[in-house]
Amino acid sequence: MNKLIVFFLFMMLGCGILIGIIAGGGGVATTDLTATVSSNQTYLPVKTTTDFLDEDYVVVGQEKIFYTSKNSTAFLSCTRGYGNTTVSEHLAGARVYTATASAVNNALGFNMVAVQDEWGWAAIIAVPFMFFIRTVPQIIRMSMNLLTGDLAIISWVFYVMAAGFVITLALAIISARRVA
């Protein structure tokens, strides 16, 4: 039973990553600063935040900047000098980009490396929690957009795997209770 649960879980994750790539989240997300940012500023005004996660870190020049929220034209609640990088002023027009390719991050709904950096050993608890509160809804949203067309089969396979996972997990819980 445990092997079946792991199989369905990995198949769901694989389908989710494929759905993310097909939905257009394959490369590094980039944008530009629309105004000069001082070294103590905690928000980044940019052209667009489309294709960026709701919480992640971005790179501007040599500085990594962690943000915890965004709107359509700014990264908000920024922690400057993330990952022990040097905080500095950045001029309008400077390139702002993700440090990693965004296909997997968009499929997951969060950046696993950033979670590990931020939480340390507590990421062992945080990652599974974030999987259920961010990844599952993210995959469902993306796959709902792909239910028609040439590659709709991937979305349908995802839903079959998700149903199989839920049913197998329920049967495992029921059988564990009967034994106890």
Image: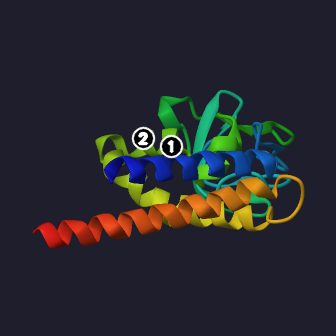
Q: Against 135, is 179 above or below?
A: below
Residue in the image at 16% along x and 72% along y: 178
Q: Which mark is residue 112?
A: 1
Residue in the image at 32% along x and 51% along y: 2
Q: Is residue 38 visible?
A: no
Q: Is residue 148 visible?
A: yes
Q: How many marks?
A: 2
Q: Which residue is mark 2?
A: 116
Q: Which mark is residue 36?
A: none
Residue in the image at 75% along x and 44% along y: 21
Q: Against 106, is 114 above or below?
A: above
Q: Position of residue 168 (x, y in %)?
A: 40, 63
User: Which scheme is used to colour this image of the protein?
Assistant: rainbow
Residue in the image at 34% along x and 40% along y: 120
> Label 2: few (<14), some or many (≥20) within 10 Å?
some
Quadrant of the drawing holding the C terminus: bottom left
Left or right of 52 on screen, residue 8: left
Secondary structure of the residue carrying numbered label 2:
helix
Left or right of 44 on screen, residue 47: right
Badge 2 vs badge 1, beta-carbon distance below 8 Å: yes
* Amino acid tagged 1: Met
Q: Nearer the viewer, residue 18 or 169?
A: 169
Quadrant of the drawing holding the N terminus: bottom left
* Amino acid tagged 2: Gln
Left or right of 75 on screen, residue 87: left
Spatial CA span between label 2 and label 1 = 6 Å
